[in-house]
Amino acid sequence: MRAFEVNFDGLVGPTHNYSGLSFGNVASTSNLKQYSNPKLAAKQGLQKMKALADMGFKQGVLAPQERPSVATLRKLGFSGKDHEVIRQAAQQAPAILAACSSASSMWTANAATVSPSADTEDGCVHFTAANLNNKFHRAIEHPTTSRVLKAMFADEYYFAHHAALPPVAAFGDEGAANHTRFCGDYGKPGVEFFVYGRAAFAHGQPEPRRFPARQTLEASQAVARLHGLTDDGVVYAQQDPDVIDMGVFHNDVISVGNQNVLFHHQRSFLDQQRVLDELQRKLAAKGVEFKAIEVPEAAVSVEDAIQSYLFNSQLLTKADGRMMIVVPEECRDNPRVAAYLDTLVKSGGPIDSYKVFDLKQSMRNGGGPACLRLRVALTETELGAVNPAVLMNDELFRQLNQWVDKHYRDQLSEADLADPALLQECRTALDQLTQILRLGSVYPFQL
């Protein structure tokens, strides 16, 4: 049976703004207080989705969250009618209001970790929503994320859903941003690669000193157990803590993988050669030839990688079996990265082309092509069980662009978050979106 990798991109929400909430994410904090353009951000994301769908790749859409999160503000002691809750928060705690208004769910690489049926003990596709415990504005996402994923992947015969891990630092889980799956064919057993920043219950292990290590080893191990993965199908690796301190807050800022290829920086992991050897050995046991493309520091520095998001890219297998890398425009603007990409595609290796997209609205908040998508490997039958209304095609593209034009502002500042009308605009938009995507009632205001 044929199998595919389907990319489900996050639809940028109406409250997309630059509040600089993500400590450790250099782009996020450096663009604090600038005006954002939610309408342009959503359209940039939709253009990428449609372009890839037109090229023959399987592409879906993942709905944004309700923001501002009035329910969260109420839990924090703000009271009265909804507009009064927002007014109080704006006056007494504007930073909390900004956190509760974040559109960060657009980066769906953090939505969940997904294991395909070929890897799991029960033969189901498993989803574990990420608790995103390290950042308050993201830690409030997982209840709605779970409802949306269940509305998209509803058939219990094929799909198993797990609640987020306990919301404590020891089990900090950032989802697929620190998870990659290697395989030969998408429908055959593979090796799932979990990358972590620190071990919570092991003393004396190296840790970053400047920025937080958001993913723990224990969280990765817990997800592997929940998904019914076997030891021969899992590899764990620790990020280089010095590189985290330079601004590599997730593994997908320093490496990306697809099928049997890992495209990574020279300074991606601690004890890097051991990690590569373990991946090679476990994949060889499954009949897969592992290929690691290591980018040397002399060609592309860590600083270049962070500035351009070269590794926060998508590796996609084309119909001819070769791979294309999808990168943001910033890669073309950086002369060293641009030169490396030209050399890469001419090298005769598995990556023979690249595609550039303008994603500046997302990039200024610290999210590139890899952040915007959640990868789900599905057999043909499993794909047939997915809610068809979330799969990109000409009609959905037209509907969503009209929807954005109708409901989104083209300029938003942090001060605008205090406008009670923004909440109503968001709810009106999301209510219509659930009808377009046939999600049912997934938002708190609908429940």
Image (cartoon, rainbow, N blue to C red):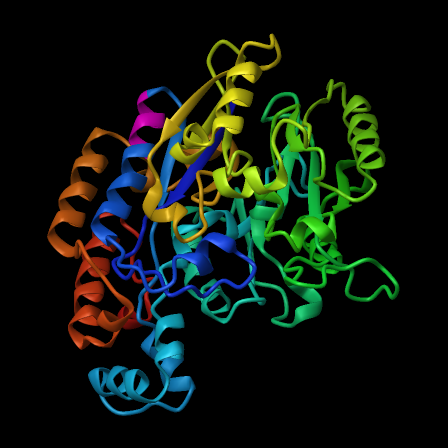
Percent position of residue 31, x then y: 39, 57
Left or right position of 385 against 47: right
Q: Residue at x 85, y 59 (%)?
A: 205
Percent position of residue 179, x then y: 63, 44
Left or right position of 279 against 252: right
**Magenta extent:** 49-54
Which quadrant holds the N terminus? Answer: top right
Q: Residue at x 72, y 48 (%)?
A: 239
The relative height of residue 109 versus residue 337 in the rendered view (above or below) is below
Which quadrant holds the C terminus? Answer: bottom left
Residue 423 visible in the picture? yes
Magenta span includes 194: no
**Residue furthest right as drawn:** 204
Seen from the viewer's position, the closer of residues 360 and 124 is 360
Instruction: Answer with the quarter of the image where residue 295 lies.
Output: top right
Q: Residue at x 83, y 41 (%)?
A: 271
Magenta span includes 50: yes
Instruction: Answer with the quarter of the image where residue 231 lies.
Output: top right
Mainly helix, strand or loop, the magenta region? helix
Residue 380 visible in the picture? no
Q: Residue at x 31, y 22 (%)?
A: 54
Percent position of residue 392, x then y: 30, 34
The relative height of residue 366 versus residue 266 in the rendered view (above or below) is below
The relative height of residue 107 versus residue 145 in the rendered view (above or below) is above
Instruction: Answer with the quarter of the image where residue 84 lies.
Output: bottom left
Seen from the viewer's position, the closer of residues 336 and 434 is 336
Left or right position of 172 against 414: right
Percent position of residue 337, x then y: 52, 28
